Amino acid sequence: MTQRRRMKVLIRGQIFASVYEAAAHFKVSPYTVYHAIADGKTDRVGIGKGKRAEGSIKKRGGHLSIPVKLGPFTFPSIKEAGRELGFAEDYFPKLLREDTERSRQLIYAALFRYEAAQANKRKDYLTE
């Protein structure tokens, strides 16, 4: 019977005797380590979405989204801001990235419409 040969793994300057040892050290599955090796991204092993900055998810109430403030309005995320302002799902982030005169005009116009709609909602609520 042949003996299995272990593959040594280098992750962030540490050498591990096997994929399984590295996976146990970083508390991930061996599949994650194999996948990182195949992608050439072993330095990312054990750094999950929430562990990039110390306590980053807890500071935002357990959500990955970051609140966005546009004028007097605060939205829970860029996606939600675009939805509330009436833009297609991927269009609003694109406008923010472009940062051209035209994109700013479109955003301002949407904000004015949103502000008017909010004012109408308040007025209707108060008259009921």
Image (cartoon, rainbow, N blue to C red):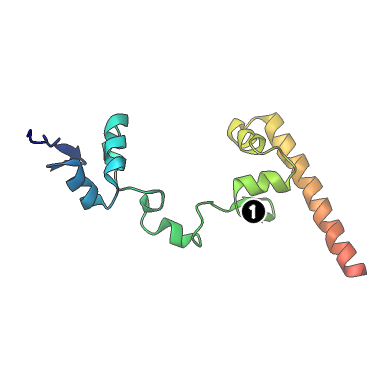
Q: Residue at x 53, y 51 (%)?
A: 65
Q: Quadrant of the C terminus?
A: bottom right
Q: Residues within 10 Å of mark 1 (few under 14, many from 20)?
A: some
Q: Residue at x 24, y 47 (%)?
A: 23
In x, y percent, where is residue 124? Answer: 89, 63
Residue lying farthest to the right in this orientation: 127
Name the amino acid, label 1.
Phe
Quick one: 125 or 88, which is closer to the camera?
88
- Location of the N terminus by quadrant is top left
For residue 60, side relative to residue 111 (left or right): left
Total numbered labels:
1
Q: Camera-side residue: 43 or 23?
A: 23
Give the left or right position of residue 32, taking residue 98 as reference: left
Q: Is residue 60 above or below residue 12?
A: below
For mark 1, give the secondary structure: strand
Corner quadrant of residue 100: top right
| Spot occupied by residue 12 in the image (x, y as percentages of width and height) | 21, 41
Residue 105, relative to residue 62: is it above or below?
A: above
Quadrant of res 9: top left
In the picture, measured across the screen, residue 11 lies left or right of residue 97, that is: left
* Residue 81, position as x, y percentages in the image: 66, 48
Between 6 and 127, the residue placed more toward the observer is 6
Residue in view at x 92 percent, y 68 percent: 127
In the current view of this chain or complex, which residue is farthest to the front?
1
Residue 45 at x, y percent in the picture: 29, 43
> Which residue sits at x=68%, y=43%?
82
Residue at label 1? 75
- Nearer to us in this view, 115 or 50: 50
